[in-house]
Amino acid sequence: MKNVRIWFKKIGTARFISHLDLNRCMLRAIHKAKIPLWYTQGYNPHAFITFALPLSLGIAGERECMDIRLEDNELTREELINRLNAALPDDIPVFDATEPVMKPGEIAYASFIMELEPENLSAEDAVSQIKGMLGQENIIVPKHTKNGIIDLDIKPYLGKTEAAPKNGLVEMQTVLPAGSTMNVNPSLICDAVKKYLNLDFYADITRINIYNADFRIFE
Amino acid sequence: MITKKIEKLLANVQKPGRYVGGELNSVIKQRDEVDVRFAFCFPDIYEVGMSHLGMKILYSQLNTLPYVWCERVFAPWTDMEEQMRKNHVPLYALESGDGIAGFDFIAFTLQYELSYTNILNMLDLAGIPLKASDRHGLSPLVVAGGPCTCNSEPLADFFDLFFIGEGEEVDGEVIELYREYKKQNRPKEEFLIAAAKIPGVYVPSLYTITYHDDGTVKAITPKCGAPETIKKRVMMDMDKSYFPDKFVVPYIEIVHDRTVAEVLRGCIRGCRFCQAGFLYRPFREKSVGVIDKQCHDLCDNTGYDEISLSSLSTSDYSQINELLDQLLTWTKAEKTGVSLPSLRVDNFSTELMSKIKSVRRSGLTFAPEAGTQRLRDVINKNVTEEDLFKTVNTAFKGGWTTIKLYFIIGLPTETLDDVAGIAELGQKVVDAFYENPDKPKGKSVKVTVSASSFVPKPFTPFQWEPQDTIETLHQKQRHLISSVKTRKVEPSWHDADVSFLEAVFARGDRRLCDVLLEAHKAGCKMDGWQDCFSLAKWLEAFQKCGIDPAFYANRRRSFDEVLPWDHIDCGVKKSFLIDECKRAYADQTTPNCREQCSSCGAACFKGGICFEKRPNLV
């Protein structure tokens, strides 16, 4: 058997399905593509499939990955990609299949692009207000946790966050802690902007890439 | 593709995956390359509608026509509806994201009486006038098919035409006629008169209904050359009948999330309360090879690893063991399971069990329907207690410990002793478990006895029967609960309020259209969902319209009364239903179609079991 890391995008309509649905969708696609998945040998055999960093519902992903374990066989990289693409909806395209280099646990950061569409405010004005907010000492937002809602200061995590006008919209770029130990959801930044600027807007969020603790691209 | 405007709503709703389309195998066409835009509307939420086999068949079939683009439309849940109304987003089709008001056909499937308010709500959300008489252009045509069209009178004011019977042929014929009339720019009235000449098409506006002083129907009179009776359409050669080789595979989990193969239509049994058992006659089977290929194609094209062999009674399929053997030749290697959704008490064998067992060990469900032999004879459920115990013992031996038994309370001639018999039967099943030497070791047994309330339906021998009042049903429910003596038997029951409304609309007439409109205005919707249903709101609507719902639900009708659906012909003769009703009161059973023909009338379709050699006649 061998481990393979499948790289795909989750875009368009696929943004609106949960991680659980994505998992089911992938299993069905693997079954449909007749890819010889390795099954655990226990009493209840199940397929070996893990996602490195699940994506929140509503957020698009440009470089997502899942690890699968295959039975030994002659399947080439190209064939694997082609078969999966034939079995998946258009909005979940597979673009690569590699041998895993890093462990999913090494993921430490993720980069995002957010497109904000402020209501009743020009993009330039919104950007200058957002910059003002980013310059504050604390940025407190309510965060839902297992133990209820807590007030979180996200200021320490916004060192790599910028805002600029683009085609009449506000484009924010950010790199946030991500992974199993510390994870900051980019929608918290949106919440902060809404709260501090008293602005309502629609945000299109895309996860662009994932990195390890040394800011090396996750492979 | 859904628009940005729709996407913006999705951040504020539960399960946005319901509203986005884009699923594997959904059909995308170019707007300017088709002549007919067809909105296939299911009047319930996505997860329910996407599980419906009829929609899968017709969606694929209509899209094989190059000039038609059939798209799916579902009722949004209340949170999404609120967002849509607030932001002026009209009801849209999932494939194109286009509002459906500009479509040629708005086609609903009528599966359940309590989805009727959803139909009005969906039309309203689409910006389409509710009443057919307020829609003057040829399009959009609001049409419907499905089992409830056998008495569509409570919806007559809202629809332009109904498809009676099976839709595979007649839908296409009507679309083709429409296409011609659209090209020639001819008026709607002319189209409807021409459409009414197609067999299986019912145009309600071409029929005048008159009433007696006592409120019963006096006469149903056709005009403009519409036929006296509308005979249902049926596909007589099931092997050649269209069946899709792929389904749309939803992103999100739906109610029946698996491949569904149809093994047969109709039912040989003739249980007297069951509308489907009479409506879908004659009994017609597909052959093993055809079902096997359809299953394999569907699994290949969807990726599902479970096949459900669907029909009204799959264990009545004459070649069930051969079919399962054939399927097992490839399903095992492809890690695909086979399940049978409908099992009968009297033909569940060890052999059958061993073939489906490998799949999933969830509970087993059987439907004795009544607690005593006398009442089972009344309803013609030809199942004995002996059958039931043979079956549950087989199941216990096979390792099952959870058994669910379905019953109906409120059946004609039922007494409180019959109700107590339900609990007693449950107890006997528990006892059988402990007496069984081969029972699973170290496990307890659980028997659920579920009691729904009897709803008399058109085209059954009980179509003249009164429904028990809500009070009586409540009394019987309480009696059932108090008759249960141990915790191993768990009773459950249906809301009697819901069954009452179902009974009103199942056998209603056109005067209920006003009530429906009133209820819609009062905000009634998603009535099939317990959290949304309010009988109080409905009773207010009845009162406003001056209509007594008990007239429809709780009144005994005489055999010579003109029934609101007398102009619909499903093949089974009224005289046969009268005979069956009389036999019920005499505790007499009627043999099933395979044992003996009882001349119900379905032989007029010239096929199926009506023309097969019966073993005892050879």
Image (tube, coloured by chain):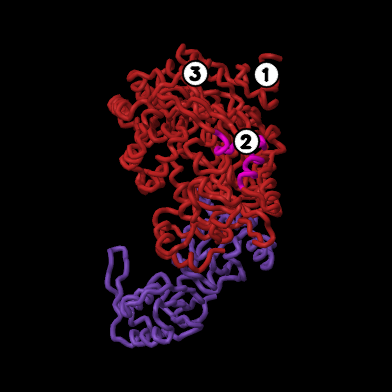
Chain colours: A purple, B red
- Spot occupied by residue B295 in the image (x, y as percentages of width and height): 65, 43
Marked residue chain, label 3: B
Examine the rendered structure and indicate whether residue B349 appears above or below residue B72. above
Secondary structure beneath label 3 = loop
- Residue B224: which numbered mark, if any? 2
Say which residue appears at 38% left-offset and 88% top-offset: A128
Q: Is residue B404 visible?
A: yes
In the image, A69 versus B597, the foreground residue is B597
Examine the rendered structure and indicate whether residue B272 appears above or below residue A51. above
Say which residue appears at 49% left-offset and 46% top-offset: B131
Tell me the quarter of the image containing the N terminus of chain B.
Answer: bottom right
Say which residue appears at 43% left-offset and 83% top-offset: A123
Say which residue appears at 67% left-offset and 64% top-offset: A82
Examine the rendered structure and indicate whether residue B153 appears above or below residue A23. above
| Quadrant in which residue A5 is drawn | bottom right
Secondary structure beneath label 2 = loop
Q: In the rendered structure, which amino acid carries the disc numbered 3?
A: Asp
Examine the rendered structure and indicate whether residue B271 appears above or below residue A113. above
In the image, B541 versus B89, the foreground residue is B541
